[in-house]
Structures are given as C-alpha cells and as structure tokens.
Amino acid sequence: MARLIDRRINGKNKSAVNRQRFLKRYKSQIKKAVTDAIANRNITDIESGESISIPSKDISEPFIHHGSGGKRDVVHPGNKEFVPGDRIPRPKQQGGGKGDGKASNEGEGEDDFIFEISKEEFMEFFFEDMELPNLVKTQIATIYDNKKVRAGHTSSGVPTNINVIRSMKNAYGRRIALKAPYKKELAEAQEKLLLLEKNSDKNRLEIITLKERIEFLERKIKNIPYIDEFDLRFNNHIDQPKPTTQAVMFCVMDVSGSMDQNKKDIAKRFFILLYLFLTRNYEKIELVFISHHTTAKEVSEEEFFYSRETGGTVVSSALHLMHEIATERYSSNDWNIYVAQASDGDNWYDDSPYCKEILSEKIMPLVQYYSYVEITPDSHQSLWHEYKNVEEAYENFAMQKIEKITDIFPVLRELFKKREDIKVAI
Amino acid sequence: MKKRSPLSTSSEWTFELLDTYDLEIARIAKNFKLDTYPNQIEVISAEQMMDAYASSGMPIGYHHWSYGKHFMETEKQYRRGQMGLAYEIVINSNPCISYLMEENTMLMQALVIAHAAYGHNSFFKGNYLFQQWTSADAIIDYLLFSKNYIKDCEKRHGVDAVEQIIDSCHALMNFGVDRYKRPQKISMREEQTKQHEREAYLQSQVNELWRTIPNYYADKKSNQEFRFPEEPQENILYFLEKNAPLLEPWQREIVRIVRKISQYFYPQKQTKVMNEGWATFWHYTILNQMYDEGLITDGYMMEFLQSHTNVVKQPDFDSPYYNGINPYALGFSMMTDIRRICENPTDEDRDWFPDFAGSNWLETMDFAMRNFKDESFIAQYLSPRVIRQLKLFALTDDDNDTHIEIDSIHNKPGYQKIRQILADQYNLGSIEPNLQIYNIDVRGDRSLTLRHYQYNRKPLASSLDEVLKHLTSLWRFDVKLETVDENGNVEFTKEQKY
C-alpha cells in the first residue's frame, strides 16, 4: 500500500534562496535592464514589476559537447519520399534543430533569457546604493517613536503572550517536586507488600492497612495538577524610545511657461523617482512641495504632480518661500533639511544674482544638502552660472543637467549616490 | 457486456479516492507481476513542481544560482502558458517517491500513479544499471548530507567561494562518472563518519604525489617513462578530487558531492527510451485493464486516451514541432511491439526474433526491462514493424560533402542498418565527447594534459573554452588539450593558462 502525503502545505518558496542567488550574481546586468526600463515607462506606472531580459550567453552554464561538423549518421522519423542514395542539399543551420537531432541541446541560441522580477525587487535594484547625504542630526523624537522590545518573562499577562515552553517547563518541575515524596513512599510500600504477600495468611491485617496506604498515595499522586496557574509564564514586551533622524525634503519645481510639456514631464519624472526613493528608504521623512512661476506656493502632492498652472518665472520667490517654511516649521537644530530644485534655468533677468544671494546667505547654512537640476537641451542660462558660484563655496551643493528622459536616472543617482567624503558646513 | 461500477465519476480527486485508485492499480500491477519498491505518493502544488523541475527532480538540493535560473525560466514559461508542467516526477529512491500535482484531475492522478508509482518504480527496482550504479536506499540521506555540508561550507568560507567551486564542478559534471567501474554505495551515516578521515587521508595522498622535488638532473629517459596517471582517466572530477594539488579539503568534498550526484543520474541518461517506454506501456495497460473491469467510465477513458496520445506523439522530421525522436513514442512503440510479437507473431517476427516470438509476453518484457539499456535495447528489440510504423530513415551528414545522403529507409535492406545507427544514437559513449586526462607533468610545471579522442571527426563545441577555464580553476595549474584523430595522430589543440 502506498503512503499518501500532502506536501502542499510545506515547502512554499523553496526556490527563493536560489532565486536570490541568481539575482545577486547577475546584478549588474539586471540593474542595467532596470535603468533602461524606467525611461520607457509611463509616469503613472513607474512603480511596478518588470520583465528583465539578459543575453543568454552571459548566463550560460558551459559543458563540453560536440559542435557541428564531422560525419554523423542520424535516424529521423516520418520519411515520405526518400529512397536510399538520395542526395539533398544541406539545410541552413538556424540555431540548431532541423537535420541534426543533436544540435538542439547546444544552448548557443541567441535568444535572451527573460524573467519577471517583482515590484519590490525592481525598486530595490533601482534605488540600491542611494542615500541622503549628511543625515546626521538625530534626536529623541516625540511620543510616537517607540519600539517594542522583549523584556524577559512575567507571571501575569494576556493569554496570547503565554510562553508555552517556559510554562510547561515550570509545570513539569513542579510535578516532579511534589510527587517525589509520595513516589518514594509508594515504592517502599509496594516492595513491602510483595514481601508480606508471600505469607499472606499470617499478615492479613498488615496487608490491608498497607493496601489502603498505597491507594492513598496513588490518589495523592494523581491529584497533583498537570498545570497550575502559577506555572504560567508570559512573554513580556516593553516600549523603548527610539532615536530617529528627522528629515524634510523640499521639492521645488519650476512650472513657468518656458517649461514646455516635455521639460515638465522630465521634471515630474525626476521628482517621482526622488519621491519613491525617499518614501521607500526612509521611514520618517517629510516632504514639502513648492511649485513656482512668478509667485511660489506650497502645494499638495496631488497638485504638485498633476497641476497645469503656468506663468512667468521668478525663481527667488520659491527660495523665499522655502526659507520661510524651513525657519518656521523645521528648526534647523532638529531637522535634516534637503532641497531638490528643478528648473529649465530660464529666469527673470535680474532675479538670478538675487537667488544666489538668498542661497548663500540664508539657505545654505540651514540645509544638509541642496541639489539642483537644470532641464534643458540648450546651453546654460544665467541661473546656472550664478549657482556655479554657490557650488564652489559650499560642498553640500550639487548641480546636474538633464537633457533628455534617459538622463534622469543617472543624474538622480549621481546626486544621491552613497558617499562618505562630504562634510557638513555648519 | 459487464456491468460498470466505476470508482468515481467526478473529475475532482480526494485523498480517499487516491487511496482507492492506488489499491486497484496496485492489485492490477501485482497481477502483471510488477515488482516495486514501496510507494510514497506526495501531493504538491504547481509551484513546488516547478521547484522540483529546476533541481532536476531532487527533493532536497543544495543552493545554487543555476537552480534559481531554471526555476525562473520554468515559471515564466508556465505562467505564459507556453508549457504545461509534466504530470509527474518520480525519484529513484526506496521508498519510491512520486509527486502528484494538485491541479490534476482524478483521471490524471490515476494515470500518474500507474505511470510513475508502478511503471518507473518497477524499472528502478529491476533494471541492472540502477541496481548496480545507484543505491535507492541511501540517496535521500545523501542529498541531505550534501545540502547540509554545502550550507556549512558557505558559512565557513563564504557563499561566493563555494559557488565558484560548484560552478566549475557543474561544468565538468558529465565527466564525473565512472563508466565501467562500479561506484561505492553511498549513505549519510557513512559519509559523515568517514568524511573527516577522508579529508586527512586525501590530503596526505596528494602531498605524497607532489613531494618529489623536481629533479632536472635526472636521467632524461627515466623521466619520460614515468607517466602519471598511468592509465588515462575518464572520470575527470574523480581525478581532481583525488589529485588536484591545491584544493582545500572542503573543496575536494564538494567535487565529490557533485560527482556522486552526477553518477546517480547516469543510469537515467542511458535508459530514457526504455524507462519512459516501460512506464508508458504500463500506464496504458493498467488503465485499459481498469476500463475492462468497469472501474473507470467512458468519459475517463476519453480523457485518458487524449493525454496518452499527446504523450506518445512523434512529429515527423519536417514538422515545425520536430525536436528529435520522442523517447516516449519510440519506447512505447517498442514495448507494445514486444508484447505483440509474443502474442501474435508474424512470419517476419519469427524470422527476426526466433528467441521470443510466441513466448510468454510478461516474462519476455520483464527480461528486456531488467537486462538492457537504450543502446542495447534498441539493437536487440527494434522490430521492422516499428521501423515501418515510425517511417524511420537514416542519413549521413558529412561536412566534407556538400549534400546529405540518405543511407537507409524502412525497407528490407534498411532495417538492420537503421537499427544499428539508431542504437548508436543512444550510446552515451558516442554522444558525449571522449575526453580523458592523459598526463600530468609531475616533475615540471604540473600542467594537466587532456586528450580528446575524436570520433567521426566531430569537433568540440565552442563552450570548450569556458569549461577549460573551470578545469584550470580546479586544477590550479595550466591545462593543455590534445586532439587524437581516428588514425591515432596526436595534435596539440589548446592551452589554458592558470
């Protein structure tokens, strides 16, 4: 008779380790595919899984086998009109197959190896090696930042927290301890009984009393409870305050008329990626969205990504607003402040030097890191040149230029790659 | 007509039903004198089936990226519907483990039980190759041992270092088998107790070999006479395990593990046609018997015939679906034909198979199952009728010739030739290149010389370079390759520097 076993319940995801090994091994190829993929994505579905394709030859497992050539005698099925002695021109070899039964296991086809990775894996590959620079100001934050930690065991608690092993251990120990004296006496009594019974007529009375005693002892032993309330032990957890870093990111976007549809699209993609990166990698981060044309205003996430408002350009308005919000709400001693600004660099003529002034004097001393991207396929404009001066003066200021969609990710990466060299200029 | 009282009518299966069907199938199999290991039938999900697939059916496997790759490949194809999963995987172990997939219908489960748990199972137990070369009792234990050992190595030496060794071993896996010498039995307990001794012993042996200080002043003649290994070695992994000078003990053990597993699968490679033919023949015979006894319904039978036909389908050579000869089709046709030759022999059969035409079919088939492998089985039993049925033809493809020439077809002068060529097509000795370790320059630069004995001028594929790199990384000194053509001329082909 066969033994039937239901294995469906166990061993799910047995291949997970092997899968991870595979992903790790081909990290660089996969990363490249991920980066390529993001450029082709619609702005709304940037955050989803992806099917990755890497050339098979890169991941082949080589083994020794015969190549084509030499003389082979082969048997095939399904003859229709051939007779011995027929000569047929050799069919073209197309990745092995026809006319040569052995060629099919050659594993040298040029097809790519394609596989799916999940959304989580995708984002992991995507944002690996990125971080906010200079995240240093840590503070014991307010109430809601507690962490549950284990703190031994207690003798009272709620049933869900019962520690079964400890409770049973206690019960077992108690049973042994309480039974011991009775058991000892019982064993002695039984031994004695055996002796007496050899001469049962003589010792009848003694036997009866002894039997009663044995019964009494057995009952005593039986009455010891299997588990008692004071055996119970409960897992104990206490709250522990957790020091966290507090960070705020100001996203400043130019929505003026000179930012055409294409540039706006690039800017939004840039901020979406930044947003995903921040929300994924940092548990606690606040985001402030500022969009500006001639005037600046703080907007909601929704508005920031989807609004169509437009006008002229005064960049300093945004910087003013940013500075105002920062000093008002995020006092620089407790908060790590970051700014990401995107613009096409086209600014009201007199405004650019003024921007530089605000930046150097007011903003830079407050912030941990300031990044500026200029989205323009053309040559740099006044804002870029003014900012250049800031870059020279402050180490924690970085600027990059984006020309086309495919630049977004490399630029983002460049701005937020992990590094150890920058020191904060406080 | 007999009254039908089928075991079930719905296509849903339950564990009780599986039990009932198994009992009936076991009874019928016993009547047909199938001798099997005890069965352990496990129900698994599609994901687990893909898992088993990816690790070539081993229920317990060590971790390696390549299994991840195969899993992802299978998963993708399955999800896109490009590929159905096999209905079954069966493991040559005692008890014999077969997997049933939960998605299967009741009929499919019955089919799989008949095919795997009684067909393959009896083949594993009976065939001489499996009896001689594998130990069904110990394999699960051994796999467990190897998994734990490799996990332990990963902890001690890092995943990357272990992976590198396994990569190299996998590249040489086909050359990790003894083709002629019977390997030792394996078992977990023994492995564990012996492993430490082995480590020490192996290392001392290796040291012994390399202890000789190169003596350049020695007589040249005597220097040449000394050749190591004395005989060329076909089992490359074995040779490396025993003789590679710089491998750490744990690395030797990993080489050994890969080699042992390769050896375990070696009989399966040599009996594909027979094994599948045998199992298919028996599921066909058993299910038909069940139908005759009224145990399964007409509807079930239709479903059965449909999947059975799919399994034994042989596309013609010019069909877009053609992918070589289907071992199920060839095996099943041959097995069925042996039975026919026993039961209803024609004059032609008496002529070709005087030994068994008209004999007891059960005994004849049992004998065939026990004593042959694909190559010899085809050479012995491929009948003219099967050749006609499959319209087999042989051709000669010579790269010195601009054309392919048809050599023989399914007619009287052709039968014998086709039989012989087809048998050779299943001869692992001619499918796999003949590579042997010929010499080690013990007194010189320690380079290893590999010889490729060419057969029909067939060259090695370009993957050779990669494999040689792996070989060098295990040997840790230079590796040279020489090619020996059929006339015995030796030609230096390649060198891979360490």
Image (cartoon, coloured by chain):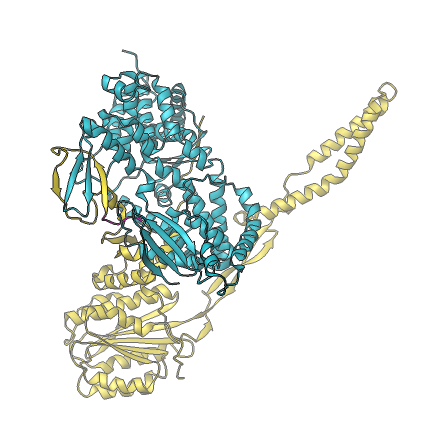
Chain colours: A yellow, B cyan
B227 lies above or below B218: above
The quarter holding residue B8 reads top left
Which residue occupies 53% across, 45% down? B191
Residue drawn 34% across and 83% down? Answer: A364
Residue B232 visible, this orientation: yes
Q: Quadrant of the N terminus of chain A?
A: top left
State left or right for residue A152 relative to residue B426.
right
- Which residues fall within the magenta stretch? A65-69
The x, y position of residue A227, in whole percent, is: 63, 41
Front residue of A239/B134: it is B134
Where residue A222 sits, quadrant-wise, is: top right
Residue placed furthest toward the right? A202
Q: Is residue B135 left or right of residue B359?
A: right
* Spot occupied by residue B497 in the image (x, y as percentages of width and height): 37, 63
Give coordinates of residue A333: x percent, y percent: 42, 79
Q: Is residue A146 above or below residue B135?
A: below
Image quarter of the C terminus of chain A: bottom left
Q: Looking at the picture, tell me which residue is in the foreground, A121 or A186.
A: A121
Q: Main secondary structure of the magenta part?
A: loop
In this view, A175 is above or below B151? above
Left or right side of A362 for B194: right
Percent of width and height locating residue A277: 32, 66
Magenta-drawn stretch contains B480: no
Q: In terms of image quadrants, where is residue B164? A: bottom left
Image label count = 0
What residue is rendered at 50% in x and 62% in y? B218
Relative vertical location of residue A246 with respect to residue B159 in this rendering, above or below: below
Report the front residue among A243 and B373. B373
